[in-house]
Structures are given as C-alpha cells and as structure tokens.
Amino acid sequence: MINLSIDGKEIQVPEGTTVLRAAEQAGINIPTLCYHPELTPYGGCRLCVVEVEGAKALQPSCTLPATENMVVRTDSERIREARKFVLTMIFSERNHFCPYCQVSGGDCDLQNAAYDQGMTHWDLQPNWQQFPVDASHPHFIIDHNRCILCRRCVRACAELVGNFTLGFEERGAKSFLVADLGVPLGESSCVSCGTCFQVCPTGAIIDRESAYIGKETEVEHHKTICVGCSIGCGIDVQTRDNNLVRIEGDWDSEVNSGVICELGRFTPVNDNRERILTPLQKINGSQKATNWDEAFNFIENKINSFKNNSDNDNLAVISTRLPVNDLNIFRELFTKKLAYNQVVSSEFDHYTKQAKLFANKTGQSFECDLTSLSSSDCVIMLDTNLDHDHQVAGFMIKRKLPTGLNLINFNSQSTKFDDLIENSFIVNKNDLIDVFAMVSANFNDTDTTSVSRIASKFGLDTDQLIKAIQTMRSAKNPVILYGGLFEEDENAFESLINFSKLINKTNQNNKNIISLKYGANSIAASQLELDQSINSSTNGIVIIINGDEDPSEKLISLAEKGKCLIVFSSYINKLTAKADIVLPVCTWLEIEGHYINSEGKLQKANASLLKPESTLSVEEILRELATRLGFDINNNDWRSSIFQNKSSVDIIEL
C-alpha cells in the first residue's frame, strides 16, 4: 500500500493507483475532461493538473502514479490559473455556442468545468472557422464544432468495443475526428453501439432521438437490465413524464461494465410499433375491441370447452423474454392444473435442451462465464454470429484482438467477424457438425494426411485447417463458444464436450465452454422444463404468450395449428392478426421480475415506465384466469423451481 497526502488528508491506496483515483477515493474532486474511469488514462486536456511537492511543473493527476509520502495539492491560485487557461484555449479552438447546445445546462463537462472555475466569458474569441456536421448515421450526429479533441470516443471505440472505427487526422488544433479513412459515419464500419455517444463529454456526438427532450438533470434514472438477448446487460433507462428518453449502459454492471449494443440502446427508443391498448375479439372474421371481463369470459369458456379434448392435445407457448415469475406461473397453470401435454417456451427444444440433459447426467455445471473470454488466448467459435446476435460478447472478443488473441471460426454463414479471423471456415450447415467431429477425432494426429482428407472432402483450405488445428493445440487457455446447431443434435453435443476436454490444458474440472443461449430467460425456461419439442399439429386450443417481442416465423406458423388461438401481445403483428382474441400486456419496461442470463447470473429487472391503465401484466392475467377456472396458484415459488434441474451454468443471484 502507498501512503500519501492530498490537501492535508492522509490517504492509503494500492500501489499503481493514480493521484486522481486516490483523490476520488478520499472524496476530493479534481476536474477532468479527457479522463473517463473505464478508459486508459490519456493525459491530453491537462485540466486535472495538481501541485506535487518537489516538482517544478504542475502534473496531470490522471496519469501520475501515487508514490510513498507524496504530498499533493489540488487547489491553489497557480492551479486555478492553469485550469482557466486550459479551458480558455479549448473554448477558442472550436465554436461552442452553449445556449444552442442540447447538453447545455448541466450535461456538458466543458461548460460545468468552466463554471466551476468561475468563468463567465471567453478571454479569447473563437477563430470562427466553420466545421462540418456529419448527419449520415441513423442514430447520432457528429457536430465537429463542439468537439474538444479529448479522444474519449476514439478510445472507447477501441478499448471497450474493439471496433476501431473512430480516429483522428492532422495534429494539434487541426486535429479532426474521422471514421475509418475519412468516410461519413453512416457509411463506415460503425456497429451503432453508441458507446462513443455515451462517453462524449460535450455535445459533439448527439443522439438523434433524445437530443433536446431531456437533460440528465431533468430525467429519471432507472437501473435495470436489457432483455434483448441472453447476456442481460445492465442499463440505465432514462425517462421523463413517463416517456422513454434514452438508454445508456450501466458502468457498474458486473455483466457488461457499461457497454451495450444497438439492440439495447437504440431499438427500444426507436420502437414505432402500434400498441394494443384494449382486448380484441374476432367477430365475424374481423377483430373488434372488447372489455376485459368479456375477454376473460371468452377465454374461460374456450379453455373449459377444450378440457376433454382427446389426449388433451392443447398447446401453450410462452416467450423467453418474460420474467421467471411469469414462466413459473405459466407452467403451474397449464402443466400442473390444466394438464396440457404441450407446454413450452418460444424456443421449443433449441439452445438449452442438450446442455441441460448433459448437466443432469453428470450432476454438475460445465460452462464458464463471459469473463473467460478476457483471459483466453484462443477462442473457437462454432455456429455463432456475434456481429448480429449477442454483440456485447463480440465486443469482449474484439477488444482483445490487439493483445494477440487467436480466433478460429467454423460457421455455416459468412459474418463480419470473418474479416478479423485468420482461420475462418464457412461450411455447409448440413456438414458443419461432421467437419467438427472429424477435426476432433483427428486432433492429436500429427500426420497431416488426415487433415488433408477432411479439407478435401468439405472443400476447405488444407494449409489453413492445419494451421487452425496447430493453433488450438498450442493454446494455453482456449475457450469454445458454441451456437444452437450443437444443441439440436445429441451426438454433436457429445462430440463438443469431448473436444472441450481434449483441448483443456489445465485439468478436467476447468470450464472452457460457453453457450450464449438465445432469449433473455432461456435458462430459466429450460430449468422449468419448458424447452420441450412440440407436435406437428394440435386439434385443440393454442395459447401464445408473446409479450412485447416480434413473433418468429415458427410462432406464426403455430397460429394455424389449433381450433382456437389466444394471443398475449403488446403490439399489433402478424400473430395477433390471426388470433380469435388478443390480450394487451405490458412491455418489458413496464414490469419487474427476474432473469437468468447466459452465465447463470440471476438478476432483477426493474420497471422504468408506468403501464397504460388498460393493459395488464402477464402475471395478472394468468392469476385472474386461474381464479376463474377454480385453481389456486398463489404460491409462486419460482426460486426453488429453477433449481429442480441441474443447469449447464452455476446459477448465482447478484
């Protein structure tokens, strides 16, 4: 530990701590602009300068390591003059017209720093040079007039996302933010994650949707989790007057450390789907608005009429985007009370079934968490598409590439990741499992003849395949990232497990395999045994609890199978158009509940918006239905239910 004094306060910090961090821990404020706690210290703006006893010049505290018995002063006339000069120069370089900026009045770090230093005017006039505005991107705008050259956006794009889209041309005051080699941002390699927008300290990067409709000082903040996929990223949902303003990543989240993707940040804000605000009943071929009492009566009568259906051939489906408490009540009502023989999640038997069966067979979990990607020297990707699905996991891999991480890819489709991977093999989907099985079977065969036969049979590059196998052999800490194709075939899954043991360099108890699953609550649905297959047809009632997601084609096809279709939905879609009755339900932002992410972390989602008075939550509807049907489902012990099966991951509550 290091002992130092800051403004007369004795402080003890771990070795390697910067003076700025030490001051933060002691509750001493030092102003910053280019500094961000999630980024490598840069020391570019010099606003954080401090006096160090024994040093002639002022020192940037963000890059200065604390040393034993160091004496630091953070506030003196000399420091204040230096900081005022720095701010004056920054204001003079570009056109900062604060009254017209959407972050003026509390959200701008530059403006706040100027006020903190007592500045009320410019000592130096700007040079009044016109700078362009790039409005080519669908989600945000770059206004170069407001850029302070802090490079936060550039460093975030590189260090947090691993995309390296942003950079700077020229030098000094002529430095200019560019995308790729100077193309418009909307035509660049940008992946629309919005991390640059979130870390920008001024109004240089403007969110199209939230600009001018709510500053940070005017919005309500709701810490919750994203339910767009199974990663379960922590997010900060910002609302105003019960309207969604913007979504930002939660820097304190253990899962994603503040980084989110386009699906989590922009898709909910740009959602223009038509909301259902009253129950709809099909009468004479067209849907008419009805009230809740009539809707419940209709469903009660239909359920009772199909009670004695032959073999009780009725079907109930629920979305894995819903909380575990909804999933458990759903199972309680339709499996245990109504005894339907087909009660499944929207994923049917994909993504989790083989993993759960193997975990139950062995009696232990076998998958590791996403942090393993950070310590791995080789990631083997099997049937995954991280530039489309689970993008945050892709960011975790991409930002490690500069450190020498090896990527090996076996996939049935081309992805943007192929450009980053030296050894990428695109194989016909019907052959992918066979290719992997043969590679696994000949993995330790030093004779390249067998590898040549594999390459020749499936049209792969022989030298590239040999190199990929050698890379996997030499990896000290390899991690396998596998997709849904290996969850659909028992033999393929067994070969996957055997291969994970084959490449394990430490011990057989070390976990080196990751599946990202699919929906936000895929694991919870699997633990509740809702990941079963379904019959090709049914002669009874079909109940689909779709929630607020867009229905998949497989869900829409189910609408044709039964004699009566009941749909729970937040929005009008192709599925609701086929329904005999539609029940309007809350969106993910209007309910609270628990989710188990792909790593097994049990997290709580909090409501961020008040629901419309005319809608109900899925839980409220199911409880009312149970009461009308004469069933008691008040005991919703979902916590014990999710541990009745062994999971492929260790389930841990955060």
Image (cartoon, rainbow, N blue to C red):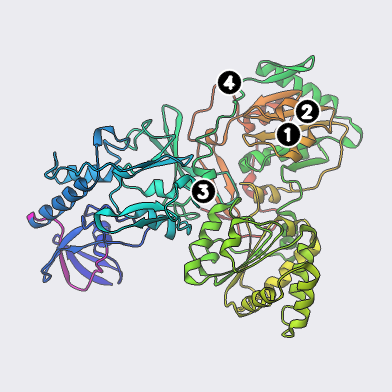
List x then y, in percent, for residue 164: 45, 58
Magenta highlight on residue 368 = no
Whole-angstrom CA distance, mark 2 to mark 1, is: 8 Å
Q: For the residue marked with disc 2, what is the amino acid?
A: Leu
Q: For the residue marked with disc 1, what is the amino acid?
A: Ile
Residue 621 located left or right of residue 77: right
Residue labelled with disc 4: 614
Magenta residues?
A: 63-77
Q: Which mark is residue 271?
A: none
Which quarter of the picture shows residue 24?
Answer: bottom left
Q: Nearer the viewer, residue 635 or 124?
A: 124
Magenta highlight on residue 76 = yes
Query: Circles 2 and 1: CB distance less than 8 Å?
Result: yes
Residue labelled with disc 2: 565
Whole-angstrom CA distance, mark 3 to mark 2, is: 35 Å
Whole-angstrom CA distance, mark 1 to mark 4, is: 20 Å
